[in-house]
Image: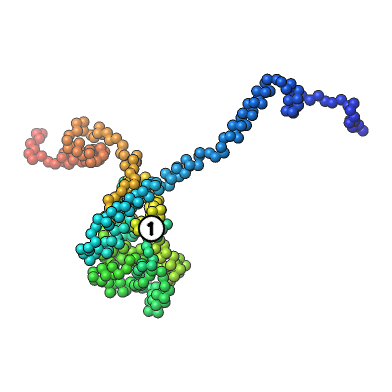
Amino acid sequence: MAKTRSKGSASPKTPTSAKSKKVGSIKKDVPEGSPSVKKTKNIKKKIVKKVEETPVETKEEPVKEAVKEVVTSVVPEKVSVKAISELAKFLKREETEATTEKTSLFDDEDDEQKTNLYLQINTKKFYSDRPQLKPKVIQLSNPIYNQENLKTCLIIRDQLVTTEDQLEALENEKLPTVSQILPLKTLKTEYKHFEKRRQLYNDYDLFIVDDAVFNLMPTLLGKVFYSNGAKKTPFPVRVTSTKNPKELSLVTLKNQLNKCLTSTSFLPPMGVTVVVKIGSINSNFTQAQLAQNLQDVLVTFDKESIKSVMLKTKLSPALPLYYTENLYEESDVLENIKPSEVTKDEVTPFEKGLLEFADAQEVAKILKKSSKSNNTKPSKVQKPQKA
């Protein structure tokens, strides 16, 4: 049997090494008046005081906010608000200088459209290669339409509304801002003439068309709706659900209608200039709301494709908000053309002109073809060869 060690005071203690001793034991062994210990104490106290005195808040947060503002938007919010306020001052000066007497019957319409605010975006390249008649819809944070006085016309296909009872039931649903529902047959028969189309254009403020028959609208509505000065381009909407594409769904129609009422649109041009309406400078909109709508439109564009951004009204000059530094990218630059690739040693003025409009390889092919065609032509007079 192994004996346990007794716990008496006479039992020898194992010596402890200096490394295993505690910090308190080391301090007790060292005399209090040693200068090295005092220096270390003073240094530690100074470090603790500096750490306590330094503020906990860091200066990284405002830097991050500034970086986010540059990344999310091309135009800062301060610049857009300043431009909107200057345009508002310009309109007030124009109102004071204008005469109170009306010279024509269209002064009321001009006064209503005078305060509309437009964002003009110039791109580096053409926005579209071919003409497009389907508008691009952009949803805004603050709707630009006043639903109290807005009149909307709905155009749907004939298969969805076959009887008058169905048409009455659809009218009794009281869709927001919808005051007229036109089947496709009535649009083809009653609004065939140009005068009727112009009257339809003037009677309503917003036109919503079933997406199944939207491709027929340019021929049925004509240049009254799709000319350069037209501002009531129809919106394509879904009228049926995905489960039943042949039956009218009021739920999807209401959702699509609310989306159109809170959005703006523009026709993709075959050029570099895009003009989008973002609101109006009046009591219904604040400067912050207009600035938010401006940011909503800019988010839909690629930053690298934007050349300049301007803000304007119908009669005011365009205020520049942004200009790009790089007008083109590296991919747009062609490689260096070596004129030595041409077959002939000496380059004629005709060949220099070709090199300005075509590649060196294409010029070489053209010259080869022309030389072969010249060699195949028979000469006018050929002497007979002697045998």
Q: How many marks?
A: 1
Give x and y (percent) for residue 320.
Answer: 31, 47
Image check: 373 left or right of 217? left
Residue at the image point whose x is 30% and y is 39% from the top:
334
Give x and y (percent) for residue 98.
Answer: 24, 57
Residue at the image point whose x is 38% and y is 50% from the top:
81
Q: Quadrant of the N terminus?
A: top right
Give x and y (percent) for residue 120.
Answer: 31, 51
Q: Look at mark 1 in the image and give the residue it sits on.
A: 285
Tell me: residue 116, above or below residue 29. below
* Res 35 → quadrant: top right
Tell me: residue 383, above or below residue 300. above
Front-most of residues 287 and 320: 287
Query: Which of the colour schemes (rainbow, by chain, secondary structure, one colour) is used?
Result: rainbow
Residue 126 visible somewhere in the drawing: no
Residue at the image point whose x is 65% and y is 23% from the top:
39
Image check: 120 left or right of 20? left
The crowd level at tag 1 (other Cα within 10 Å; few <14, some 14-19, many 20+) is: some
Amino acid residing under circle 1: Phe
